[in-house]
Amino acid sequence: MTNQSIQPIIHNSRKRRQRTVFVTLVLFALALTLSATMLMLGNTIYPVADVIRVLFGEQVPGASFAVGTIRLPRMLAGIFAGLAFGIAGTVFQTMLRNPLANPNVIGITTGSSAAAVFGIVVLQASDTFVSIISIIGGLLTVLAIYFLSKGAAFSIGRLVLVGIGIQAMLTAVINYLLLISRQNDVGTAMRWLSGSLNGVKMETLPPLMIAVALCLPVILRLSRQLQILELGEMTATSLGVKTNQTRVLLIVASVLMLALATATTGPIAFVAFLAGPIAKRLVGDGRSTIIPAALVGVILVLAADLIGQFAFTARYPVGVITGMVGAPYLIYLLIRMNRRGEL
Amino acid sequence: MNMPKKLHTPKRFGLLLVGSLVLLVVCMLASLAFGSRTVGWDELLDGLFRPAVQSYEADIVRQRVVRTVFSFMCGAALGVSGALMQSVTRNPIADPSILGVNTGAALFVVVGIAFFNISTASDYIWFALAGALLTAAFVFGIGSLGRGGSTPLKLVLAGAATSAALSSLVMAIMIPRSNVMDQFRFWQVGSVGAGTMDSIMTFLPFFIGGIVIAILAAPSLNILALGEELATGLGVRIGTLKLIASFAGVILCGAATALAGPIGFIGLLAPHLVRLVIGADERYIIPMSALTGAILLTFADVAGRLLGSPGELEVGIVTAFVGAPILIALTMKVKVRGV
């Protein structure tokens, strides 16, 4: 190969990298703006100066409570849940090479949610223990889906079907638990069925934050292998990727984040489904979508929460808004896949 | 075509019929006897056959009669509805709840409560039917796009996605209106406990109409099972048949959903159980699915009352617990083309 013939390839690759960097920066700026807006907006609108003073620990009458105790945990929960759902969603979608194969559609988030409700209602467990149970719930759901769909002829189609079945059952479990706990007020039900940032407290956040801080580097380190996995088992193996080890690590890290995010905010509907495809559309093929998807996840959660809180006369939990966006997109995706004969 | 069936069906069928009837009677008696206050055999007979006897227990039994009849009708309707949907789509994983038809009915009921101030069974039913019909058309439409027509995977996914979209809408309408929420939440769990004489009378015309159509369509559905080309060759008007049969199926489940709330998986389970025992003849499957559906729902209702005592566990939750594993088992057997 002459130097000239690879020139265009290098050129394209550079252009794609530039695009990724640009997209990532824009997404980051957007996420930052939304976070700031979340701190400023509310019943009383506080100026940036007040918000910054509160963040630096100064006592500002009124603002300290509203921003520091109510809005800050809400924003942080939104950010970290968005990161967790976005990353985990795109990891599953890339690994299984299908946008349908994401934690929302195949029921992993429902598994964590059911486990969390079980911990709260039946065991009356502490926050830490609820986190642990929801991790176990998520992992068990993954295992169940894996073993039930393995069978003689594995296909993503079967996996998705099994996932939907498992989800139906877990939703019944959640409904049952909410019913026997006499906790079936709407707020609680909404949180555990479709996700909500209402009433998040600072004390409940650390497990999720730690999980994201630990798992994100692991997943980023594996992002190259993940991209190769997407090319198929054979190619990946021949390129020297330890496929099974990589997969297990990726799944465990993703489920860890998913489960803790779910234990904190409930399974915010369709964020894990939407983030990956949107990120992919933005950065184009051939680039890792993990960081862009993480940012898209944050943007989705924060924007949906802002819309839910302020755009209408009534206040909607974040999951209702993401559900209204996500479900039609899922229908659109199905129509497109059906037309192309991909299903 | 009739030959092989005539050879083996009657013997087994007679046995099955008697067995199911006995089971049904047992379930219905249990439904009369058990609950937050369990009554004995004598009081049961008092309540049923001796109108002169006035006692607390006899009154309870009389009230449970309505509930029992209502759960019989809902179960039968859901069973037949499932059998029709499975046979029209030629897809083993078809059920009003899986295909999202229940959620469509729910959305329309909520719209009715919120914007049209409906509150009685006879109002609910029209809204629910409209919602069920539109949703069914939509889901079948999406599910049969593209190569190979409707496959289990396409239909289930279309149903799940539509269901998710519609339930977000339900939430959006409901959250700002607490009065609607109260009214809707009673309905939404899926329970036969709220059945009244009024709901039975409202249900009756749809129930009879749907079942009669189903029974009349059965022989043609048998031919359809041989494949569309062959059925056309044998003189079946496929389009009309599918339209009428799915119409009947949707009417049955829509009416049951309107009155009892969304109850999942009876429509999935009943026809499969029947097929396991008597094979693939729709002329037997449809009536037997009605019986089996009634048994399952009545049984689930009694189980819910016993498990949830002193209160009760809504039958919709019980059927989901039992039905979802069956759905999973079925997906493992279904042929799914690799995606």
Image (cartoon, rainbow, N blue to C red):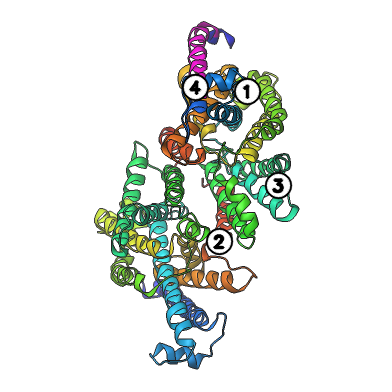
> Residue at left 75%, top 52%?
B116
Q: Are marks 4 and 1 on the same chain?
A: yes
Answer whether residue B76 is visible to the viewer in this image: no
**Among the 4 quarters of the image, the one containing residue A263:** bottom left
Find disc 4 in the rendering and name its residue: B275
- Report how far apart the C-alphas of labels 2 and 4 lie in the structure: 40 Å
Q: Kindly identify the amino acid type of the residue bearing the numbered disc 3.
A: Ser
- Residue at the spot of label 3: B119
Q: Image quadrant for the N terminus of chain B? A: top right
Between A32 and A181, the one lying in front of the other is A181
- Please name the amino acid that badge 1 sits on: Leu
* Pointer 1 local density, CA inside 10 Å: few below 14, some 14–19, many at least 20: many
**Residue A124 left/right relative to B186:** left
Q: Helix, strand or loop at disc 2?
A: helix
Kindly report which numbered mark, 4 or 1, lies closer to the viewer in this rendering: 4
For mark 1, give the secondary structure: helix
Q: In the image, are marks 1 and 2 on the same chain? A: no
Q: Name the amino acid type tagged 2.
A: Val
Placement of A143 over or under B325, stated as above or below: below
Q: Are marks 2 and 4 in contact (CB under 8 Å)?
A: no
Residue that lies at the very extreme toward the right in this rendered image: B116
Name the residue carrying label 2.
A320
**Percent of width and height locating residue A194:** 49, 58
Relative image position of residue A143 (x, y in whole percent)? 31, 48
Q: Which residues are magenta?
A: B6-29
